[in-house]
């Protein structure tokens, strides 16, 4: 039995497949032209798309507006950078980021999930600000200067290795990494657990009457989002070779929310398209005018007013209808 | 979108491949904050660079090649700065890069330059780490670092108020504590005694709670490194309590600036600080520079504008000495380079790529900064603490 949720997820999968194909073409053209900048920009776009993905799990499926997701993104980035400076191993860095994010996510989730709605948004915002200030003032973490000197690493798979300095290699690796995070999130949200999250978003008071606990699923959703944000963040120092406290600032969290709203809330794939669009747009517009924030702001307002379901709202319903027709026939 | 970008990438790559001829301009990338909190500093950087470039181009350019500046907004955010620097190096193929303001951006962009095999110079960042423990063979600094400012102030203090009793009041965050520690060690080295120190939170509304401690330690000199509106409150409250009589207030170069001076008013009278540049410097070179700067921009230059202006001439001298824009040759030419700037002759020390320059001590008098002394470059520079190259 295929219901509306499964069908919409499948529509998202098709859009992700299109994105992957487009990215592969982009990588081939990039390599053919010996390009470095656009491939690295694309990699950065994908990394920030991963952060947006984590925001969409909370905002689009669980109904929680997090204004502090940069906390986990920055946490992943700093943990990864610190580990890489001791031992240049991809697996050690991401493993450490994963572990730390689970612990901090559990603590943060325990605190933030005591409240609802706007208070939740404020608490997540506050926690991220506290973390940013602590990092900003800690000498051992480089304080306001951040940490430079994160080495170039070889990501070792046993049979092959990819250098983080290879623009195309690391781009494709990041693409695979983010698609795996997407697939994990999409799978999870299609399970009964995922449906419970959607029920929480629809009406949290009624859920207990169906015999379900509400506290644990909310906490788990928060932790999963924390882990996805931290794993995306862990790639950042590998790409750029440094981390700075600005990664934990509100602008990072705010951009992630803008990304999700522009791409389409509650679609997962919208976060990926939105993240890529916003990063590229900022880079291109920023080169022409110093008023690029005005341009981004106007586009965001336009998206909210004219595309209430985001960019994905334009194409995804059509794909869903197509899928529905095919299943009937 | 991805497709469009690849097209754009292909186009840009094609134009970049069309080969560099001798008559092509020398491209200098400028990654500087054009929006946000530091936009005011970025503006001065831009004015200084533009003015010098105009003069150099009018005089025939560098080795017959015109100089072209390409600006990118870094939003005072290292993550953005790195991305923009990467673009300037890889897409625009700039020969040299400058403009970064906050120290985090300079350090991060320095690393990008190192990996791209290019050179950068900062004209603004003053964190000591850039030319000490985090120095890079590809990074130069043509402005005075924090250590030079506090050393100059300490040397002046030892002459004007020998064996002074100094009290320290800093903002309670990492930078505030490190500036106080740096000045304290510089002052103690030249014979001052320290009578106490307190740290007040940023954005403190009330400094009077520290005044009891200040009075009981009977200092002749108060050193402070608070900035912005905090200085306004601190100095006006000191004045209201009558504590400014018989007390010399000295501070970091960012404590009293042209921006907060009008708000502080009379309470700022007598404030002394050490700086690398002042528009009041009484030399023909500086007068000419200030006049040209005012004519072009309808504003006075500050130290950021002057240091940025000087950089273009340093790069010109180095490229002409090297006979090329090649990274290794220009690096060698910049090392131990001596060149003329509005604030006098500067020397780039080969050991740590830090500019050695005469430092000025300025005092607020009649609502204006007046030069009251100068300290020779060698007295202010301090030892070479860079061990990487």
Image: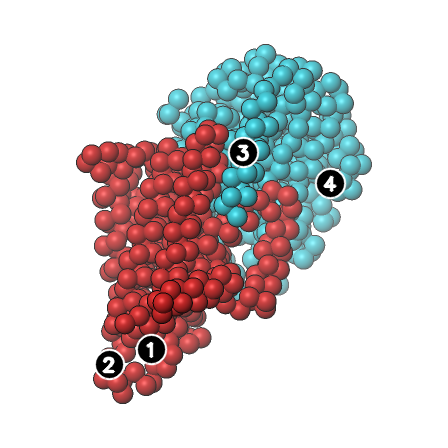
Q: How crowded is mark 3: few (under 14 residues within 10 Å), some or many (20 or more)?
A: some
Q: Which colour scheme is used?
A: by chain
**Cα–Cα span, label 4 and label 3:** 44 Å
Picture quadrant where residue B130 is located: top left
Circle 3 chain: B
Marks 4 and 2 in Cβ contact (< 8 Å): no
Q: Residue reaching furthest right?
A: B295
Q: What number is the disc on residue B300?
A: 4
Decide: is B159 above or below A248.
above
Which residue is identified by label 1? A199
Residue A180: image x %, image y %? 30, 52
Quadrant (top left/top right/bottom left/bottom right) for the C terminus of chain A: bottom left
Decide if residue A155 is on the left or right side of residue A166.
Answer: left
Instruction: Work out whether residue A175 can be spotted.
Output: yes
Instruction: Count neighbours of disc 2 (C-alpha within 10 A) and say few if under 14, some if 14 to 19, many if 20 or more.
Output: few
Tell me which chain the residue with mark 2 is part of. Answer: A
Q: Which residue lies furthest to the bottom in this view?
A: A209
């Amino acid at each position: 039995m295929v219901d509306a949720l499964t069908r919409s997820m499948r529509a998202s999968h098709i859009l992700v497949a299109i994105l992957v194909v487009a990215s592969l073409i982009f990588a081939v053209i990039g390599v053919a032209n010996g390009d470095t900048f656009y491939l690295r920009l694309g990699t950065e776009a994908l990394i920030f798309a991963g952060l947006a993905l984590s925001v969409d799990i909370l905002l689009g499926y669980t109904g929680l507006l997090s204004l502090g997701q940069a906390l986990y993104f920055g946490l992943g980035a700093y943990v990864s950078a610190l580990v890489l400076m001791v031992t240049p191993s991809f697996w050690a860095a991401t493993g450490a980021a994963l572990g730390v994010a689970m612990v901090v996510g559990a603590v943060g989730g325990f605190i933030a999930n005591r409240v609802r709605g706007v208070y939740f948004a404020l608490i997540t915002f506050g926690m991220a600000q506290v973390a940013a200030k602590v990092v900003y003032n800690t000498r051992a973490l480089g304080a306001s200067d951040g940490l430079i000197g994160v080495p170039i690493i070889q990501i070792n798979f046993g049979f092959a290795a990819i250098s983080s300095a290879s623009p195309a290699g690391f781009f494709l690796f990041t693409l695979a990494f983010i698609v795996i995070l997407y697939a994990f999130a999409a799978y999870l949200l299609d399970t009964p657990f995922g449906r419970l999250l959607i029920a929480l978003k629809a009406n949290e008071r009624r859920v207990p009457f169906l015999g379900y606990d509400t506290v644990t699923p909310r906490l788990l959703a928060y932790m999963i989002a924390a882990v996805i944000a931290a794993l995306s963040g862990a790639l950042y120092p590998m790409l750029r070779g440094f981390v700075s406290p600005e990664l934990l600032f509100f602008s990072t969290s705010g951009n992630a929310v803008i990304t999700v709203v522009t791409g389409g809330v509650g679609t997962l794939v919208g976060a990926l398209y939105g993240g890529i669009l916003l990063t590229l747009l900022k880079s291109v517009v920023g080169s022409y005018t110093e008023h690029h924030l005005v341009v981004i702001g106007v586009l965001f307002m336009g998206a909210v007013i004219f595309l209430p379901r985001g960019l994905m709202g334009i194409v995804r319903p059509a794909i869903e209808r197509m899928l529905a027709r095919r299943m009937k026939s | 979108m991805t497709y469009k970008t690849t097209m754009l990438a292909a186009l840009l790559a094609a134009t970049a491949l069309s080969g560099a001829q001798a008559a092509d301009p020398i491209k200098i990338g400028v990654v500087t904050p054009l929006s946000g909190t530091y936009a005011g500093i970025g503006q001065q950087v831009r004015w200084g660079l533009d003015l010098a470039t105009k003069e150099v181009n009018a005089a025939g350019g560098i080795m017959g090649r015109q100089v072209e500046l390409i600006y990118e907004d870094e939003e005072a955010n290292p993550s953005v700065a790195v991305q923009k620097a990467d673009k300037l190096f890889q897409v625009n193929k700039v020969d040299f890069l400058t403009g970064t303001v906050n120290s985090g951006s300079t350090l991060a962009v320095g690393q990008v330059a190192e990996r791209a095999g290019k050179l950068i110079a900062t004209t603004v960042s003053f964190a000591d780490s850039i030319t000490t423990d985090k120095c890079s063979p590809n990074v130069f600094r043509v402005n005075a670092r924090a250590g030079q400012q506090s050393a100059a102030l300490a040397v002046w203090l030892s002459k004007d108020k020998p064996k002074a009793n100094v009290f320290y009041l800093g903002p309670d965050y990492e930078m505030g504590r490190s500036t106080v520690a740096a000045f304290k060690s510089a002052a103690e080295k030249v014979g001052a005694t320290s009578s106490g120190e307190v740290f007040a939170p940023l954005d403190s509304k009330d400094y009077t709670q520290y005044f009891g401690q200040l009075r009981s330690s009977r200092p002749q000199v108060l050193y402070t490194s608070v900035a912005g509106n905090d200085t306004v409150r601190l100095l006006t409250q000191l004045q209201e309590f009558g504590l400014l009589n018989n007390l010399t207030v000295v501070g970091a170069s960012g404590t009293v600036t042209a921006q907060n001076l009008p708000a502080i008013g009379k309470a700022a009278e007598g404030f002394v600080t050490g700086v690398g540049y002042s528009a009041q410097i009484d030399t023909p070179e500086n007068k000419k520079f200030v006049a040209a700067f005012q004519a072009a921009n309808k504003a006075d230059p500050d130290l950021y504008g002057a240091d940025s202006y000087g950089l273009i001439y340093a790069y010109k001298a180095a490229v002409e000495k090297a006979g090329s824009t090649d990274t290794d040759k220009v690096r060698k030419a910049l090392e131990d380079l001596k060149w003329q700037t509005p604030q006098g002759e500067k020397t780039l020390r080969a050991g740590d790529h830090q500019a050695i320059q005469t430092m000025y001590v300025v005092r607020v008098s009649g609502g204006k900064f007046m030069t009251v002394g100068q300290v020779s470059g060698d007295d202010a520079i301090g030892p070479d603490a860079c061990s990487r190259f």
